[in-house]
Image: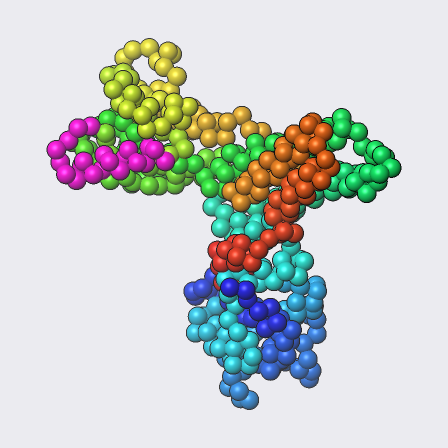
Amino acid sequence: MKLPTDQTIAALATPPGAGALAVIRLSGSDAFAIAERCFSPKGKSRTLKPFRVHYGYIKTGTEDFIDDVLVTAFKAPKSYTGEDTVEISCHGNPLIVSAILNTLLLNGARDAEPGEFTKRAYLNGRLDLSQAEAVAEIINARSQSALRGGRNQLDGLLSAKVHELRTKLVNASSLVELELDFAEEDVEFIDNSGLIRLIQEIIDDISALLATYSFGRVMREGVNVALVGMPNVGKSSLLNYLLKESRAIVSEIAGTTRDVIREEMIIDGFLFRLYDTAGIRPTDDVIEKEGVARSRETIRSADLVLFMNDINLGLNQELFAELLQLTTEDKIITVFNKADIYHGTLSDIVLALSAKTGQGMDNLLKTLREKAIGGSVYTEKTVIITTQRHYNALTKAKEQLEFALGSVRSRMSGEFISVDLRNASDSLGEIIGDVTEDDILNNIFSKFCIGK
């Protein structure tokens, strides 16, 4: 549903609950007027001056005051939303926050929808769509890598690259269409080989962006790792060691873990979700059988599978063969546990460890990180694709350019080439919001928290 932007909206901008301070945000053409009706400043003037902080009280009527507050006023277009905006800092008691919000609503504001402040910032040209999405990424980031990716996107690295590619496309399309206008004079503004080079250059740039998505998804979403092995190989002990707490039950009794246990940890700034699965083995126990079924499903959806073996028993060939039916071999990391009680030679075993003493853990963590991000080496200024929406838009643009390239090579009419180039430009425009639809916008901003 398209939201009316001619109304003044209000919402709590800080997290709900008790705290030292809370900030309530007003945005819209009547923001100053509504705030002034509710605010009694400690001074002679009742008028809010832009870009100043005012001290006073919020009142429910002529006498009763709710709280002493600091009010900051921002005049359009120099505000987050691009509209007149007022931020009220009060004590962080939920009763106070509720009373102030109710007073603002009674004086002409309405409740803000999720993400509506940022949506207005986008509609008013303060942010493009990819930057608006980055706001949510920063708020919801759960690792340093996700935070860094969101920050780069908000800083406009992706936007700048998209604008660069669209400029090249517009130039190419203009030359093609110019030739169409002078078709009768047989004037050539760009030869076929030059046009092929230009289109191929843009395709190569898009391909390079698409290649960053695997790494970008790891930055944004983290890595799902399934801990797999026969009962009593030490999966739960490994989980407990990595988390530095007794999270999973450890027992000599086979089949102790009946369900999938999920925990999270950070390795070098990247989020890893560890899934301790039930030991995979034949069983007549109904509950354990369900646990084994869930383990198999976890393996299918995992980004990596940590295949644990007892070093004294060697590689479990039967279970390894089953894993290959559930996932691909490149996702499997084979480790051998109980190295602390192994009397053989460890030099021939790549990943030997002890979940009891911590032996080999540094090597394991290094392997997990390298396996997750591959050989990716990116600087802070590298443009990285982190969302499926951006990946899909780039893929569509690349397909349209490949159509155009085929048309040029086949020496087809410029009309066909021009259409494909414009379609590619529109697909790139979807990333930054130059070309989009209301339902896409509403879907994006509905995922934001209220107040942002």
Q: Which residues are magenta?
A: 281-301
Which residue is depicted at the point 49% across and 58% down?
Answer: 446
Vertical order, 238 against 81 (above or below): above
Q: Is residue 91 visible?
A: no
Which residue is depicted at the point 14% across and 38% down?
Answer: 286
Q: Residue furthest left?
A: 284
Vertical order, 367 against 75 (above or below): above
Magenta highlight on residue 347: no
Q: Is residue 186 visible?
A: yes
Which residue is depicted at the point 80% across and 32% down?
Answer: 190
> x and y percent of residue 431 in the render?
60, 47
> x and y percent of residue 154 in the render?
62, 49
**Depth check, front residue: 202 or 343:** 202
> x and y percent of residue 120 in the render?
61, 62
**Depth check, front residue: 2 or 96:** 2
Which residue is depicted at the point 58% across and 39% down?
Answer: 396
Q: Is residue 132 left or right of residue 125?
A: left
